[in-house]
Image: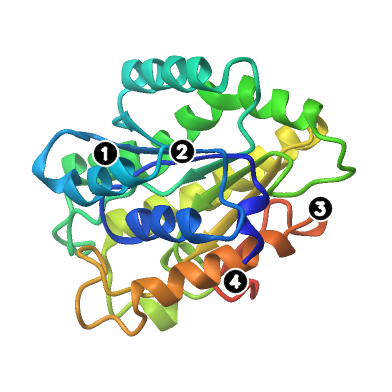
Amino acid sequence: MAAGLARSVLLSGSNRGIGLELVRQLLGVPAPPTYIFATCRDPDGPRAKDLRDLASRHPNLVLVKLDVAEPSAVTAAVKVVEEKLRGLGLNLLINNAGIYSSMASLDTVDAEDMIRTYRTNTVGPMLMAQAFLPLLKKAAQESPEEGLSFSKAAIINISSTLGSIERTPETFFKPVISYRCSKAALNMLTKCQALTYREAGILCVALHPGWVKTDMGGQEADLPVDASVRGLLSVLPMLSEKHSGALLNWQGKAIPW
């Protein structure tokens, strides 16, 4: 697995599910990142015990308190990461934090649920990219690599096939209106980020991890979390300029908008 080529990685939503497994597998590669910044809302709380156990055994794992929906928390997290990096840039930002707050249909979804979901799933990744942009730009400037790559400087937004407008008819057995609308918006955000940050040398891609057996995905899901994450990490080294702004699944296959 070549994912360890990124010198520094920051992941949001790292205390469970896909985020926690990403941390585990990144720590286990032959050449792990010098710094893995694992963020969650309450790193000292009971839901982050597994993350703390990993940090106690791996000095390159740094736990950072962060709620991606709160601008002040994002700003505070940037300061923590800057201090740790000591003048170096951040190579890889993985916006993984997300909520699947309601199974509501179009008849039952309300404004509060829609706004809460958008704040975490769409506004959060926007705020994260804005706040960490100087560090990402610095990493791109420091790199001797040509073109775009995940090990140079990249923003990876964890999205979903439920955000694909073209595929909606085949996935609509689960309406989950707030979630799928927020992910469709995240896909648009990824495309806009790709067009905006390309000149700075930053690769921007949306990845769908599959329907994964996690607290969010449920036990009826068909993909174990370790298999999903192995797939995601195997896709990262394959990404280049031609994938900028794309939506791909955990096997590297393109998903239509």
Of marks 4 and 1, the one in the foreground = 4
Quarter of the image where the N terminus is located: bottom right
Mark 2 or 1: the one toward you: 2
Residue 115 placement: quadrant: top left
Give the side of residue 38 with respect to residue 86, left or right. Answer: left
Q: Position of residue 134 (x, y in %)?
A: 64, 20
Disc 4: CA contacts within 10 A as few (<14), some (14-19) or many (>=20): some
Marks 3/1: CA–CA distance: 33 Å
Q: Is residue 236 above or below residue 63?
A: below
- Which comes sooner in the sequence, label 4 or label 1? 1
Q: Which mark is residue 217?
A: none
CA neighbours of label 3 inside 10 A, class few (<14), some (14 to 19), many (20+) = some
Q: Residue 85's image quarter?
A: top right
**Spatial separation of the CA atoms under disc 2 and disc 4:** 34 Å
Q: Nearer the viewer, residue 224 or 83?
A: 83
Query: Which residue was labeled with disc 4?
Result: 255
**Label 4, label 1: how many angstroms apart (C-alpha)?**
26 Å
Pick the front one: 171 or 97: 97
Residue 219 seen: yes
Spatial separation of the CA atoms under disc 4 and disc 3: 17 Å
- Name the residue that disc number 3 marks: 241
Question: What residue does disc 1 label?
Answer: 115
